[in-house]
Image (cartoon, coloured by chain):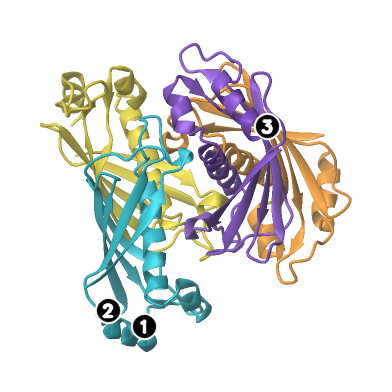
Chain colours: A cyan, B yellow, C orange, D purple
Amino acid sequence: MLSTRISIRVRYGETDQMGVVYHGNYATYCEVARVEFFREMGLPYKELESQGIMLPVTELNLKFHKPAYYDEVLEVRTILPEIPTGVRIRFDYEIFNEKQVLLTSGTSVLAFIDKLTRKPVRCPDYMKDRLNELF
Amino acid sequence: MLSTRISIRVRYGETDQMGVVYHGNYATYCEVARVEFFREMGLPYKELESQGIMLPVTELNLKFHKPAYYDEVLEVRTILPEIPTGVRIRFDYEIFNEKQVLLTSGTSVLAFIDKLTRKPVRCPDYMKDRLNELF
Amino acid sequence: MLSTRISIRVRYGETDQMGVVYHGNYATYCEVARVEFFREMGLPYKELESQGIMLPVTELNLKFHKPAYYDEVLEVRTILPEIPTGVRIRFDYEIFNEKQVLLTSGTSVLAFIDKLTRKPVRCPDYMKDRLNELF
Amino acid sequence: MLSTRISIRVRYGETDQMGVVYHGNYATYCEVARVEFFREMGLPYKELESQGIMLPVTELNLKFHKPAYYDEVLEVRTILPEIPTGVRIRFDYEIFNEKQVLLTSGTSVLAFIDKLTRKPVRCPDYMKDRLNELF
């Protein structure tokens, strides 16, 4: 298991008229956290794209336990439960508020896709090797 | 089972640099479809809120099978599989493109919440009665 | 002068905790309206892009007179005040609520850009000819 | 004149299919920068709202000189050109990329509004006093 933590401050436009973060925005929070996970592992996502591999989300599951409010600094924990062996990679997320209350938990699955053919490809070796080193 | 269908045209700002709809926007598509489901059933969501009941999403599960592109007119099918008996209501979604290819499927669970106490409440009787009539 | 009108229903996620439409979303409303303007003129924007011309916004000016609320059906009027002669095209917008109260007015300027060179190009002749026909 | 600077990293979902930041997202960048301006001045915006004063944007003017790209760290400079004397406050913005190239410049005007009456009110004295101290 590998995990990282980042902080995200809730933006005004991310709230809705219930006075809490609009649930659709958590997909973005997870994505921001995942990008930082890759960066921290020395595997910047931008580089992956420049090598012709895209990583679209194929599955997203979120449970909203408690609301988040404007201007709160959320902590997003990103967990890689296992090294990808095939064409997919799975991440788990836990989002906490400043009082360490768990607000949202979730999972996303992403697929390695060749930018030109738009077909699934295996997780590149350099990524697998690097993750194996860190695990 | 009750179901409705609506059309949504993909907006430019909803695409990302992969040239497809950003996955986070499907939460919005489902919400727009759900609002029209309620309207079509004669149960406008706005009225529910004005009666002091909010309906936040507590769970969202989405599977992305194929991408959607800018300017496509998507069809979102909203399905109420069963009449809510407790404090929650579940919807299923199927999103198709113009060629009737299934792009995304999903489920969301929402909770009836009292606006003042912010506590869960049962599905209001007028809603249950109306849905029973239509089922 | 050429003008078109479209209707847009306010989405839940477009509101913020003030209980009104978040001001940043009006850029999207104008874009949606502009796309329909082009379509109605027989000049679909998608076709323009497929011909290798992009039309990024280079200037946006908005005045917010009154707020818009959740679920309201807004009317967006798009006005082309004059036929573009150079590398830019300007649109004016007026956004009304259902009671025909003017909520927002604005202007945007867009530049014709070659997709490959990313340099400004003149408004394509077929577009100028078509607009001249309609003016 | 008072000014602050913040950094914002471009999120994936903020790009569009042109491969650059969607222009509508700059309204959000300015808002995030403005909130940090207030915080840095010792005048947190959240506190203003909790005192019953809202600060909706009444005017937004943006010029897009150059595009911003995914994952770039933008610098947003927020400038208060003068202390508000009436019911409005104006900010200027300059957004730079990592190479200090000016990408976007703009202005927004906001109105002090009483949360209950929804009428304009003067800039609160504690804010004027604090800004005067710092100017």
Callout 3 crowding tier (Cα within 10 Å): few <14, some 14–19, many ≥20: some
Q: Is mark 1 on a helix, strand or loop?
A: helix
Q: Look at mark 1 in the image and give the residue it sits on.
A: A127
Answer with left or right where residue B65 lies relative to residue A83.
right
Q: What element carries label 3?
A: strand
Please report, as a chain letter, where disc 3 is located: D
Q: Is mark 2 on a helix, strand or loop?
A: loop
Q: Which badge, 2 or 1, is on the more N-terminal residue?
A: 2
Report if the CB atoms under discs 2 and 1 are less than 8 Å apart.
Answer: yes
Kind of residue sitting beneath label 1: Met
Picture quarter with the N terminus of chain B: top left
Image disc number at residue A84: 2
**Where in the figure is residue B39, as x and y percent of width and height?**
35, 27
**Where in the figure is residue B135, as x and y percent of width and height?**
18, 32
Residue D129 picture quarter: top right
* Distance between mark 3 and mark 2 Cα atoms: 51 Å
Residue C94 seen: no
Please report, as a chain letter, where disc 2 is located: A
Depicted B5 relative to depicted A7: above or below = above
Residue A41 picture quarter: bottom left
Q: Look at mark 3 in the image and give the residue it sits on.
A: D90
